[in-house]
């Protein structure tokens, strides 16, 4: 009854693309969205994959995402550009910003693209990995509405703002970290709720802002390391949202200016290290560092020491071969959307 | 017996400056070191203040710090510069990098300075706050030798690599975060040892790599959020140390190339947001965001909701007035150094 439906990733990608095209999104943009979501599913990060499609379609319906929106550079200096997303979906705007950051970095050494007025950005590691595969180092951050507790507050004050860092490695792989600033992800909170597994202390608050271990009552994840995680999330809002005049937290908390904004802002930074070092020497040093860390004694002899991003590469090679398993809940959502928009499912 | 010696910060700063001048450091550089250490003491971060002087002097003696070292720009592109610190003390090299990053940002929008071959950088928040006070956003990271557990490993594999983010605010204050990637700082670990307070589970390992709550046995702090904290620390090494060909972890772990390097590398990034927004509008948005977060219901009515960096500003105004309390242990170290180098103590 709870068994997953296994779908080959190419077929799933085509289905997702058609679903967005059927909602008036241009084909190239629909592919951008599909690629970003499938990337997460292939790497085992199912919380950022096709499970988000229902939300994306809902946002198109409500006008929060404009399927015809085209990201536009509205301001620039030599090494920084500001992209107005015009409510285009996150993967469209952030991919555009990522490619721009890469072009700038190749000219001046470092490129920053500030992206404003986009929506759910999908996994930020998707963009930093893309830069690392071009031989660049990358930093990406993104801000959204309040859903995580701020240290010392009995309620949601900040988003689970993610931070992603990446560096190039051999064979078109990258070493990259993609972490949220929460102690537990929204996805994991929901998983515990479905399975009725009690939460650890300090993981979450209930809707009234009181700490709880009851998975049925927990609604607000708490920050990683208290003031560290919520401080990081707040700094990400202050850096990505305020200079582009699109604050997300203040109006959501106070209800001013129309209240909650289903909106996101992001920064993508690319650094062209090849201007400053021989890339072959760099890669040799990387191999040596990875080997040294992996050569440390293991905490549990049965559990390998992994690099940031490595688990996802392992999962990807399995899922590229065997297909992606989709839960009955998500299949039901996708069946409904396929019916609504007259698209044929590949299952 | 355990009472602290209270010293006014100006007198303490003069003493520290003279102590380094007496070891052949040029006056301006000695002041840079003194300013960085005093900044931490004034803000209540005593682990990064004058308690480090004994270590700095030891490093001068052993040749790890060159008191005559002058940081030098050895490579540059339009928006990135690489500074060879020539073993000058961290506060000298990183301050130089900070000022350079600021100059570049004012020209091209963003400036990155990669600093190689320096030593203990002191608190990274010192440099990001400096940039924020000039109206810039800032990101700074630094890497050093392995002293923190890597997730899954039974031993030290990475440093407690810090990350600092800062944005400008009114009245020459900044909102800024300065966090390590560890769940507990080395300083706090030592404090628990002195007071014989048991540690929380998951805080530390003993010298054999086994988890322990015994403060007398704990030597290796564990990472914040497991793979998140150790992943962050590793990414910081890969970004700051490898492109400048000065890896710190691999040789320390394997003993290759002379083993442990008492050395650090850092990145300082400055972004001139005033090119893209009206700073008055930005500051108004900042005030609104701060007010919204501070207006959230409190977890504990007696405990204020604080911004990143705010506790340090409160402490600073107290200590500027009342002086800085120094522990008997540190006073003893400083007395010995004063005697060794013929400098008069202000107490």
Image (cartoon, coloured by chain):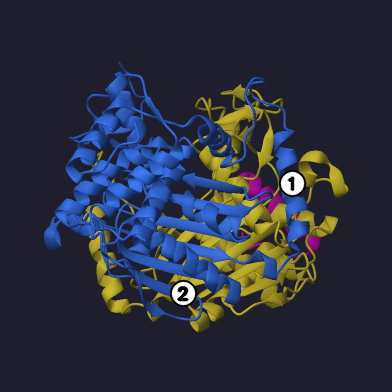
Chain colours: A yellow, B blue
Q: Which of B132 and A198 is in front in this view?
A: B132
Residue at mark 2: B80
Q: Residues within 10 Å of mark 1 (few under 14, many from 20)?
A: some
What's the residue at 47%, 63% (across, down)?
B98
The kind of secondary structure element at disc 1 is: helix
What's the residue at 59%, 56% (across, down)?
B132
Q: Mark 2 and mark 1 in contact (Cβ < 8 Å)? A: no
Q: Tell me the chain of label 2.
A: B
The tally of labels here is 2
- The answer to whether residue B56 shows anywhere in this view is yes
Q: Position of residue B212 (x, y in %)?
A: 27, 27
Residue at mark 1: B287
Say whether disc 1 or disc 2 marks the residue closer to the N-terminus.
Answer: 2
Instruction: Give above or below for A266 relative to B201.
Output: below
Q: Tell me the chain of label 1.
A: B
Q: Nearer the viewer, residue B85 or B224?
A: B85
The kind of secondary structure element at disc 2 is: strand
In the image, the segment drawn in magenta is: A325-347
In which quadrant is the C terminus of chain B drawn? top left
């Amino acid at each position: 009854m709870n068994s997953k439906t296994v779908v080959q990733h190419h077929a799933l990608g085509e289905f997702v693309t058609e679903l967005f095209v059927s909602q008036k999104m241009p084909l190239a943009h629909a592919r951008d969205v599909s690629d970003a979501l499938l990337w997460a599913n292939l790497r085992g990060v199912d919380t950022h994959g096709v499970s988000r499609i229902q939300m994306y379609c809902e946002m198109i319906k409500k006008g929060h995402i404009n399927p015809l929106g085209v990201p536009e550079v509205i301001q620039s200096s030599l090494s920084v550009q500001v992209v107005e997303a015009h409510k285009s979906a996150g993967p469209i705007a952030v991919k555009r910003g990522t490619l721009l950051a890469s072009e700038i970095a190749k000219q001046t050494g470092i490129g920053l693209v500030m992206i404003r007025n986009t929506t759910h950005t999908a996994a930020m590691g998707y963009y930093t990995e893309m830069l690392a595969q071009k031989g660049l180092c990358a930093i990406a951050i993104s801000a959204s509405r309040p859903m995580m507790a701020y240290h010392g507050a009995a309620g949601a004050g900040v988003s689970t703002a993610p931070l992603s860092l990446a560096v190039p490695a051999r064979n078109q792989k990258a070493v990259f970290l993609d972490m949220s600033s929460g102690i537990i992800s929204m996805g994991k909170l929901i998983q515990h709720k479905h399975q009725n597994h009690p939460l650890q202390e300090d993981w979450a608050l209930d809707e009234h802002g009181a700490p709880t271990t009851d998975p049925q009552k927990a609604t607000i994840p708490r920050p990683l390391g208290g003031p560290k995680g919520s401080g990081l999330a707040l700094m990400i809002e202050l850096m990505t949202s305020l200079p582009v005049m699109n604050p997300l937290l203040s109006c959501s908390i106070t209800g001013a200016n129309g209240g909650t904004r289903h909106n996101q802002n992001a920064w993508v930074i690319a650094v062209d290290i090849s201007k400053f070092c021989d890339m072959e020497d760099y890669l040799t040093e990387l191999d040596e560092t990875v080997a040294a860390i992996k050569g440390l004694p293991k905490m549990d002899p049965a559990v390998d020491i992994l690099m940031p991003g490595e688990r996802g590469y392992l999962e990807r090679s399995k899922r590229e071969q065997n297909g992606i398993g989709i839960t009955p809940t998500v299949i039901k959502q996708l069946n409904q959307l396929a019916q609504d928009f007259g698209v044929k499912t590949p299952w």
